[in-house]
Image (tube, rainbow, N blue to C red):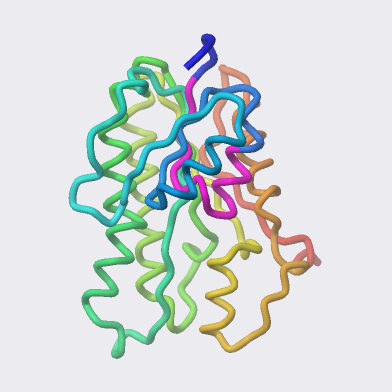
Amino acid sequence: MAGHKPVAVVVGATGGIGRAVANVVADRYTLCLAGRDEAALKTMTATLPDAFHWVVDLAAEDVGVVPGELTTVDLLVHCAGVFERADIHAMPESAWREVFAVNLFGVAGLTRNLLPGLRAARGRVIIVNSTVVTGSPAGRAAYAASKQALRVFADALHREELGNGVRVTSIYPGRVATEMQRTVRRTEGGPFQPDRYLAPESVASAVFSVLSTPPDAQVTEFVLQPAWQSG
């Protein structure tokens, strides 16, 4: 890695939100693009000015060895997540475990492994959550429960690491025009209407706004709704 730019880890980097986040911070950071699709990571890495990739599967029991380049981590952005839709009586235990493995346990494990680097850099953790934490619609119990647990995790991380100089922010977007949202709408039996959802770039702009917060302040929660819902 050339230069002395700060280091940012973007988890779920090849997804809609992760890709937008990587693009918006690429000029300011050396990027570690993390995810489980190695081919997509390699392709994306080649398009950015100062980046490397880390193949990591949040659903695995162990997220793996931290790359040697991450002795300091100035920014960690969690964008990865999975969605399963089924009523509680029909949702198999395996599906519950998969959702929690990716949306909570993998996030917790990877963050724990990167804490030494985050502390060394007095870095930031930004977790892209969901407005589903305000209440679960029918058929989304596993997803909503995992996101509510992620909210609790972020709050605890904030309180525990503030003394170490690590600032933690949760961003809660409404519906975002991503492939996951396309899947959600298909399971709901409704049309995919990207012009009525947030653009991934809008979520990335929220991340950039958090990064612009001066050192004497921090944003702990950031709620972002599609404009069409206003009024």
**Going 25% across and 44% down the picture, which residue do you hit?**
63
Residue 200 place in picture, x, y as percent: 65, 53
In-front residue for pair 5/202:
5
Q: Nearer the viewer, residue 36 or 112?
A: 36
Region of the chain picked out in magenta, as a range: 7-22
Residue drawn at x 51%, y 84% is 187
In which quadrant is the C terminus drawn?
Answer: bottom right
Q: Position of residue 83 (x, y in %)?
A: 43, 69
Q: What residue do we see at 40% from left, 19% from top?
A: 165
Q: Is residue 2 left or right of residue 165?
A: right
145 on left or right of 18: left
Magenta stretch: includes residue 15: yes
Query: At 58% across and 51% down in the image, what residue appears?
Result: 17
Examine the rendered structure and indicate whether residue 149 appears above or below residue 45.
Answer: below
- Residue 137 as seen in the image, left or right of residue 96: right
Q: Is residue 120 above or below residue 137?
A: above
Residue 25 picture location, percent across and down: 62, 31
Q: Residue furthest top?
A: 4
Give residue 190's position: percent from left, percent from top: 63, 86
- Residue 211 in magenta? no
